[in-house]
Image (cartoon, rainbow, N blue to C red):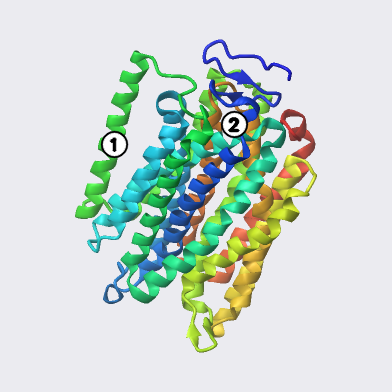
Amino acid sequence: MPQHPTDAVTGASRTGNGLYVPPGTPSGHGTRRGFLILLGVDLWERFSFFGMAAILVLYLTAAPADGGLGMSQQTATALFATYMSLNFLAGLPGGWLADRVLGARRAVLAGGALIACGHAVLALAAAPALYTGLALVVVGTGLVKPSLAAMVSAVSGTAKREEAFSRFYMCIQVSALLAPVVTGFLAEKVTWHLGFAAAAFGMAAGLAQFRIGLRVLDGTGSAPTRPLTRAEARTAARRAAAVLTAGAAATTAVVLGVLPLLALLALLGLATVCLPFLYLRSLGRRTTVDRARLTAFTTVMAASAAFWMIFAQSGSVLSLFAAHHTDRYILGFTVPASWLQAVHPLFILLLAPLARRLRTTTTAKFAGALAAAGLSFLVMAGAALLARTGDVSVAWLIAVYLVYSLGEVVLAPAGLALAAAVAPPGYLNRFLALNGMFAAVGVVLGGQLYRLTAVLPLPAYFLLMGGIALATGAFVATRSSHLRPHLPGC
């Protein structure tokens, strides 16, 4: 087997596609059993994530008499979008901690414990528990997601990296399919907080499974790839303390009513949009990545934000549409609105095998996915127009989920594989986190733009969102000849 160049600082070996593998990674990047262990913990983590995503906006907007918080739809949607975007954004500090302090496996264990605690806090009936629980879930997810992705990349090998991410993405849809059904039934038919408790149980089960299976992973992810020096550790501790203090102060101010929630959400949204671009600019000065390659990567990732802008509105805008404008009475039973969130992962499971056979360039995948996202909201505009005269058939929402699922099964694994291929030595977790950060940009933009429905008719809103996605896809397609030479695998 040919030897790969070695990083003189970390001792990590470099693969043909530029991925640096931490010392102690098993020969051949691990085994099928290692892949299954990682898949198992992600299945449970996704169960908790999608379970809560299916019920959160419905809980926030439900009347207090029904056990909810009675928020307006615009405020609840903005809060949900901020929560979702922070889940993506937290991958940056989480990936940094895995790279420099914890190592991937300790990051997964610590993050999983925080997620389980966050859902348990949300299961409490007290309203102030909402912000504490959401914050714990965000921090935990930031630790878990980039670390799991890095370990999957390490045990799969560079030749099969995108295929491995495709399989991983397909398999976790089982959790995304089951979670809304379980948590949605408990939340809407019994009590909201029992739905959150089910999500806590799911994450606890995932943690137990991962801890038992650690020996199968041998040395993968056991140590940070670029450990901090003492001076760097002191600086990082001071910055972390400042961030945590500011976050606690802001949360307290919102709970006490001193700071308006929408003002805080707007500030967080602005920071979310700016941060990935600022961070990439910093990376351009501190890493060995070719400037043209980094620019092409930034362009493609920024374009992908328009796709995630559509995707993330499934748990908010489409969920509210299902609850208030859709005829859900089937065979004598009113289907919980949250159950419709299970339609999307069902399509992912059905479509993923076809997507794995797709052989085309990365830019073509991104452009096609954006076109699918835009088309899905044009369909949604038609549904909203008909809803003006009464509830519409669930077939409209099913058609929307089908169309943008076609885009997701192509774009999601391609984005992870591209980020892993571009990453320089010692920065794998953080480049994988960058993929999530640009998704966060789209999520928060979608949540903030939904506030336009206060002045725009709902059909016009869907047309606007669909038009943005279609225009972005057309831009990627027309620029593909300039982007492809600078992107690995294109």
Tag 2–tag 1 contact (CB < 8 Å): no
Name the outermost residue toward the bottom.
Answer: 332
Closer to the camera: disc 2 or disc 1? 2
- Marks 2 and 1, how far apart at CA: 32 Å
N-terminal of the pair, mark 2 or mark 1, is 2
Apparent side of residue 204 relative to residue 326 in the rendered image (left or right): left
Tell me if residue 303 comes above or below residue 216 in the rendering.
below
Amino acid beneath label 1? Leu
The one of 305 and 418 positioned closer to us in this rendering: 418
Secondary element at image label 2: helix
- Reading the image, the residue beneath label 1 is 244
**Between 259 and 355, which is closer to the camera in this rendering?**
355
Query: Which numbered marker is on residue 115?
Result: none
- Residue 189 is situated, as x and y percent measured from the top left of the image, at 38, 76
**Total numbered labels placed on residues in the image:** 2
The answer, for residue 455, to whether it is visible in the render is no
Which quadrant would the N terminus be assigned to in this image? top right
The answer to which quarter of the image holds residue 61 is bottom left
Q: Residue at x 25, y 60 (%)?
A: 124
